[in-house]
Image (cartoon, rainbow, N blue to C red):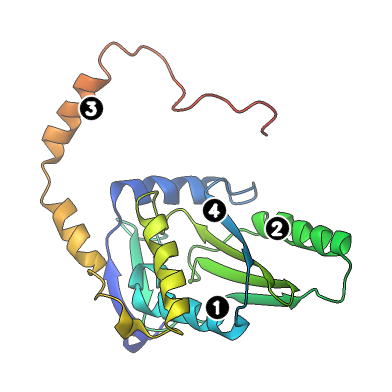
Amino acid sequence: MDKRELEDVLPLTAVQEGLLFHAVYDDAAPDVYLVQLSFELEGPAAPARFRRAAEALVRRHPPLRAGFLHHGLSQPVQFVPREVPLRWHEADLRELDEAERRDEVQRWLVEDRGTRFDLTRPPLIRFALFRLGDDRFHLVLTHHHILLDGWSLPLVVLEYFALYDHDGDESALPRAVPYRTYLEWCGRQDRDAAREAWREALAGLEGPTLLASAAPGRT
């Protein structure tokens, strides 16, 4: 990539480094850090506005345009292109009967969950919109967890629908805080103190443990 096409090159957070390791450790297996959100929407809506909102969302937040490199580097980095192609899929299923529409959406969802992202080829987020009726839609947002954590995701979803309401006009939303600001804050933290805090919290733990209970029937 030409340097003129780059907006920024940034370090990774500690969590991102861990997610990158897991993503590349076995790139032939299903990626358990692929996150898929589905929304069933009812009411008058304009499909073109959903796409314009997606374009604005990715344009507004540089981390949603990030790719990740590690081969031949002493430390992995995330690079942010100034522009990326929007990954958008749209299908009108109104000519199918109800059962066929449901089966087609479910088939696509399974296929989408099995389609890994190449972390070196951003964007690592994609959108899909299925029209089920004149006023019924199924919207899907799929991304890699390395982009968004549990705190960020609800905010991004709220912004997406706000951008839909404003037809993709970013000026209607408050200015986004640069991601670099958060990385700079991370860089000022005392790593030795953090290690000591975790060492104290995990004292006495002699074997592996589950962070959450196992889900029956889940593979």
Earlier-in-chain disc, 2 versus 3: 2
Q: Is there a contact, CB below 8 Å, between mark 3 and mark 4?
A: no
Distance CA(mark 4)–CA(mark 1): 19 Å
Residue behind mark 4? 35
Name the quadrant of the N terminus: bottom left
Q: What residue type is labelled 1?
A: Phe
Which residue is identified by label 3? 198
The extreme bottom residue here reads 4
Query: Residue beneath label 1, please?
Result: 50
Amino acid type of the residue that numbered disc 2 sits on in the rendered structure: Leu
Q: Label 4: few (<14), some or many (≥20) within 10 Å?
A: some
Q: Position of residue 13 (x, y in %)?
A: 29, 52
Give the SS element for disc 1. Answer: helix
Please tell me in which quadrant of the rendered image residue 147 appears: bottom left
- Dot 2 falls on a residue whose secondary structure is helix
Q: Residue at x 85, y 63 (%)?
A: 98
- Residue 55, compared with residue 26, is above or below; it is below
- Say which label, 2 or 1, has the lower sequence index: 1
Q: Nearer the viewer, mark 2 or mark 1?
A: 1
Q: Is residue 9 left or right of residue 197?
A: right
Q: In which quarter of the image is residue 159?
A: bottom left
Q: Which residue corresponds to the image point at 87% horizontal and 76% vertical from the top-left?
A: 95
Q: Which of marks 4 and 1 is nearer the N terminus?
A: 4
Q: Is residue 137 above or below residue 75?
A: below
- First-in-chain label (3 vs 4): 4
